[in-house]
Amino acid sequence: MTLLELERVSKRFGALSALEEISLVVGEEEFIAIVGPSGCGKSTLLRIMAGLIPPSSGRVLLEGRALDGVNYETALVFQSFALLPWLTVQANVELGLEARGVPLEERRRKAAFYIDKVGLEGYEEAYPRELSGGMKQRVGLARALAVEPKILLMDEPFSSLDALTAISLRELVLDLWADPQVPVAACVMVTHLIDEAVELADRVIVLSPRPGRIVAEVRIELPRPRDKRAEAFNGYIDRIFSLMA
Amino acid sequence: MDDKVDPLPNTGVNRIFGLLELLDDHGGREDIYRLADELGYELGELLAVLKAAEMLGFLETPGGDALLLPLGKEAIEGDTNLKKAIFKEQLQRLGLFRHFVAYLKKREQRSASREEVLEELKRLLPQEDPEETFETLVGWGRYAELFGYDTDEDRFYLDQVWVSGPASPGGLE
Ligand SMILES: Nc1ncnc2c1ncn2[C@@H]1O[C@H](COP(=O)(O)OP(=O)(O)OP(=O)(O)O)[C@@H](O)[C@H]1O
Ligand SMILES: [Mg+2]
């Protein structure tokens, strides 16, 4: 089933054209990666999907209906974590729920559930400054998951982490994605790392340099867990690399 | 408490598990220099993570290689709760963690201030940076749900009631 559909979406900022004629369908059970050169409009595309900014032209449809304003079926995970430093882990995770008017009891319960899911039980009273980057991003994931979005949007979620921490967090995202208790129906992740896209996604959308247009869509037909040393894995990397070059 | 107390490498849980995953991707064994190279890590940085994983019984380092052990493999294949349980059990074998479990148990409300813990660390490990060790103690301890630290109250505490004794390393009341 189609969850979200973009129909010939373009975005201009004044004279600058950021995205041109993006048509894209996000279906249920799909993990989509968006790759493209720096400044080609990847973050803009995610913000349009989240309903944080409107397209200049074209349409965004959520389950077949035109999206008007914030898309409450999505939640965002940011490269910079975007945690509030004066709030504890627990309070940061509850934040999104509070903004959506969820009553206190339920906030506590859902926050506790997702804190547990991302492996942060034991950190509830910690402040962001006490945490490593990897643990901060676990908080970012718990906060996004706690509102139980149908579509999880991630903007370069591992880019500010060191290489080993990023490996760990990718595994966590795959575990959460496979977890039947986590009701996310689709993931859309922006990345500039082709191997990260091939490792995680079912479908990779390749954007051109700005203004971003869709150059190609590559379906990754590899069984999970994926063997990064397999020839087929590297075949996909080479193919996407040449599409971007 | 006559347990031997070894210093802790200053590294975090995510890196430790990341290294086990990477090693698994390499078929369970790889040359340490090649790993550092692939990661873009300084050798010293990688050695700290290797040391941590080795202390925890997740890998060995024979002849310049890193070799994933069955426990390390079990940990990365398990879900979050199994990872934590294994991590906790392994922490309880380390002298420093055993020491602080015993130390906290003797105290009122099973807790101590940060300053008190730093003093104890200076006494136990005079060569080490106590602040760094405290950070690692809290970081690993929180993940394992063995220790907690409440900054507002300045309270380092035992997260759960603990039964000591080598016969029951995982024992909880
Ligand atoms: N609010 C805005 N006002 C004006 N220009 C903007 C705005 N947001 C983005 N842009 C411009 O639109 C273009 C696309 O930006 P965007 O952040 O979406 O790219 P990106 O692909 O995410 O880049 P990066 O790889 O650096 O994260 C850039 O040239 C950027 O400067
Ligand atoms: Mg961006």
Image (tube, helix red, strand yellow):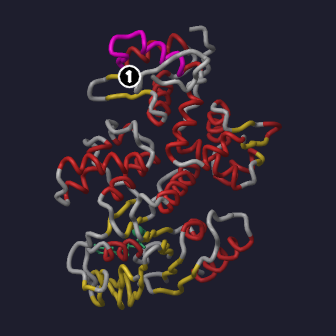
Which range of residues does the magenta coloring cover?
A: B97-113
Q: Is residue B51 magenta?
A: no
B132 above or below A204? above
Ligand 2 near label 1 (Cβ, under 8 Å)? Answer: no
The quadrant where ligand 1 appears is bottom left
**Viewer-nearest residue: A208 or A146:** A146
Relative to B100, does residue A237 appear above or below in the rendering? below
B155 left or right of B66 in image: left
Q: Residue at x 55, y 32 (%)?
A: B10
Magenta: predominant secondary structure element?
helix
Image quadrant where residue A99 sits: bottom left
Which residue is situated farthest in the right direction here? Answer: B63
Q: Give the labeled residue for mark 1.
A: B157
Q: Name the residue: 53% across, 32% down.
A: B88
Q: Where residue A58 sits in the image (x, y, percent)? A: 30, 90
Q: Is residue A159 visible?
A: no
Type of residue at label 1? Tyr
Residue B107 visible from this viewpoint? yes
Q: Residues within 10 Å of mark 1 (few under 14, many from 20)?
A: many
Left or right: residue A206 versus residue A238 is left
> Residue B48 versus residue B52: which sits nearer the camera?
B52
Which quadrant is the N terminus of chain B positioned in? top right
Q: Position of residue B5 (x, y in %)?
A: 60, 17
Quarter holding residue B169: top right
Q: Chain of mark 1?
A: B
Tell me where residue A33 appears, x and y as whole percent.
49, 73
Looking at the picture, does residue A205 appear above or below residue B142? Answer: below
Q: Using residue B140 as the reference point, say whether residue A146 is left or right of it.
A: left
Residue at coordinates 55% horizontally, 66% vertically from top-left?
A200
